[in-house]
Amino acid sequence: MDFLIGWIAIIPSYAAPLLLASLGLIICERAGVLNLGAEGLMAISALTGAMTVLSGADPWVGLAAGSAAAMALALLFGISTVALRANHTLAGLAVVAIGLGITGVVGRPYVQKTFSGISTLGDLFGIDRGSAFGRIFAVQDPVTLALPTLVGALWWWLSKSRHGLRLRSVGENPAAADVAGIDVQLVQFGAVLASGLFCGLAGAYLSVATSHVWVEGMVASRGWIAVALVIFSRWNAARALWGALLFGSADALVPRLQAIGADVPVYLMMTLPYLLTLVVLVAGSLGGRRSGEPAFLGRVYLRQDKQ
Amino acid sequence: MTTALQQAGDMRQPLGTPAALLMRGIGKSFDGKAALRDASFCLEWGEVHAIVGENGAGKSTLMNVAAGVYVADGGDQSIDGEAISLRSPLEAAAAGLGMVHQHFRLVESFTVAENVLLGFGRKAAVKTLTDAAAIVSAKSSEIGLPVDPHKLVANLSIAERQRAEIIKVMLLGARILVMDEPTAVLTDEEARTLLSFAQRLSRQGHAVVLITHKFREVAAFCDRVTIMRHGETVLEGARVANVTEAEVARLMVGDALTVAGRPLSRPGDVCLSVERLSARATAHGQSLNDLGFELHVGEILGIAGVGGNGQEELVACLLGLDRAGAGAIVLDGQDISTAKPDQRREAGLRVIPSDRFDSGLIRELSIADNLALTTVASGSFGGPFLLSRRAMREKAAEAIDAFDIRGATPERPASLLSGGNAQKVLLARELDHGLKVLIAHSPSRGLDMKAAEFVRSAIRRAVEAGAACLLISEDLQEVMSLSHRVAVMNRGRIAGCRQTGDVTPEWIGGLLAGHA
């Protein structure tokens, strides 16, 4: 029972960065820009967040600063892909390399310096940790609490609102969007920046809210899991919530099992999200179901192209 | 001749009422290549105006300029007498001009209503999907083109998508409707419905532009015709009643056109026989049911029929791409019904597929590579570890010469070729020495008159040289003029077969429609 409560209590903090990053990627990819750069965006925001808090700022300011840093890197990605029409895949991989490279160099003086992060609900509201309920809720933070609402709002915005319709049309058929008077590049630019914002929140959450420390390589492939999660959730924000909980609980299981002294094959556990994604892909194609992938994802649209 | 006709056209300049669309001296280049030079066009209210011309004559480009998709390099245009310079399709829509493109501008994963809502843009009065669906239904019944606003575009037939696109364009306020080869993708029946809709629209005071290849449509449904050639207007706005098909053809092509008839060869022994061929239908396809025919040496057997009646499936079965469920395919006395595609090719089967770039050529590869593709495995161009590029280049240079492939060098990618020249590459590859049976599926689809004529006469020469050809085509005129015998395909079987001389309109019409 103790084990179960301990496990459930930490699932949200494992799921939150995955969910945040994948929400950003969903926005970006629904507008047709393939974004593989999450790992780099998260790294740069995790470091910036840690640096900001270490310099004495409030953790919330650290979260904002991390997001801003990731948006700056996303801006670079947007300029190369949307404005200069670079290959999305290569530009995304470059973002990963840049993010990891910069954080490796700049972050060296900050490694292993701990700081105090975002207050938990327990600290904020003085939740009694006596009951199982209390033990689970006391360790949550405002970010995880707000996430379900954010997912709901984003899902509604993307699938029901007119602006969401316009954004999706760009990813599905930019020529049709263009005819409808939508500035394809502007929408894509906005979507790329939004992915920077969300991936930045995810990365800064890792250092500021969860670990309270900067360590090189601390993103630990969570950006790639987010990429897999987008495919797993078939580009649907609501499904991404369940996917993030699933992947997050698998992720959270490792330290819990280690804590009780169980011998777990850590590397095998880490492949689980990718395996599940593969299963979803195969199941989808066998079932003849649409993968939900935006039709124009990763391609470059040029209006004056002679077709 | 030309000038006389042009004068006849100019005589009909507007008296008092401004033209719906007037374009003068329009120029447009892509990457330094001129697609339009000094093109002009004048459209009146209340008419259906045809623009005809060969592939690459600039018809679509001119109308894309009119619709604001392309920005012209030079020239003036005005809509309803007001000079405008369009920067985007939305501005054209606001000015009352809507275009139905050859490739529909619809988002497939959206419903019809969502597409319409999208088209309305930011400032429109229609804001919700419910409203959008309601006005789609209303417009749909008003203009007599049925469409379900709640259906996903991906689940609509081509004709339904076209109707959805027309309704969308009209809802956006188009009083000038431009349709780019709208009937190319339709059955005859659907085409007639669409064209009479265009006529009805013009009678209500709208103006309709119809880009087309087919003179029959011009003669039956249009008021005036403008002819383009090489990016210029060669005949502007002549009354259809005043021109003949021969004149139009001559103006379009620019030089004399010989009409290929049937090959001079007499049919000999049976070289391909198909007996009781059956195949189950795939996802959206048609099954083949007990289909059979015989093809003789030196013969063209034409298979007429409305598209989607099993033609694609028959070709796939003959080539060995699909496995037939039952039946025999015998080529020169040898049963090949279980043979693999390369073995069938070895046996002398060749194909011109209906979609050149889908299953014929590889866009990204060079012309030399494309030409060598089918014979590389047999070692014609060097051993398994080292290909002789030089041999491939020389072969390609010969083919380019022999088939007059314009704009081609051996090293250029096939994607740079126009439709007609790409088809010539395919012909050069398929009409080789090993050819015994050629399956030609819509070999002149989408080609201009001159290129189509080239393809037909190449097939005719091959058949006269001792090959046999199965000509599968939806173009009845093509089938009738080339074939020794005509068979009609309907719902996955051969509904009837006759010597071409015995074919009557009643017979073929009945079989096409499936009364039999």
Image (spheres, rainbow, N blue to C red):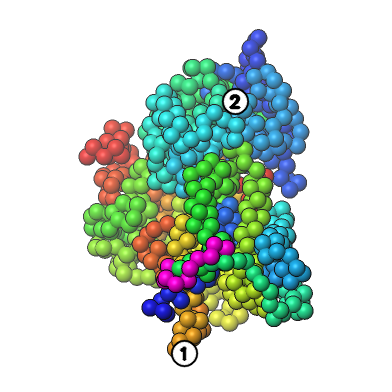
Cα gap from disc 2 to disc 1, whole angstroms? 74 Å
- Figure check: B199 above or below B66: above
Three-letter amino acid code of the residue under disc 1: Gly
Magenta region: which residues?
A124-133
Question: Circle 2 — which element?
Answer: loop
Residue behind mark 1: A261
Q: Percent position (x, y) of residue B257?
A: 56, 38
Q: Nearer the viewer, residue B193 or B483?
A: B193
Is residue A55 among the parts visible in the rendering? yes
Q: Nearer the viewer, residue B105 or B389?
A: B105
Mark 2 nearby-residue class (10 Å; few <14, some 14–19, many ≥20): many
Query: What residue lies at 33% left-to-right and 47% top-to-bottom?
Result: B309
Is residue B463 among the parts visible in the rendering? no
Q: Nearer the viewer, residue B268 or A36?
A: A36
Q: Percent position (x, y) of residue B226?
A: 60, 27
Q: Which quarter of the rendered picture does the C terminus of chain B lie within?
A: top left
Three-letter amino acid code of the residue under disc 2: Gly
Q: Chain of mark 1?
A: A
Q: Is residue B411 magenta?
A: no
Quarter-wise, where is residue B391 in the image? Answer: bottom right
Quarter-wise, where is residue B81 in the image? Answer: top right
Residue behind mark 2: B96
Query: What residue lies at 69% left-to-right and 32% top-to-bottom?
Result: B86
Q: Percent position (x, y) of residue B178?
A: 56, 30
- Figure check: B133 above or below A287: above
Query: What residue lies at 46% left-to-right and 37% top-to-bottom?
Result: B129
Q: Nearer the viewer, residue B290 or B254?
A: B290
Q: Percent position (x, y) of residue B152?
A: 41, 44
Main SS, magenta region, reads: loop
Q: Which quarter of the rendered picture does the N terminus of chain B lie within?
A: top right
Q: Is residue A128 magenta?
A: yes
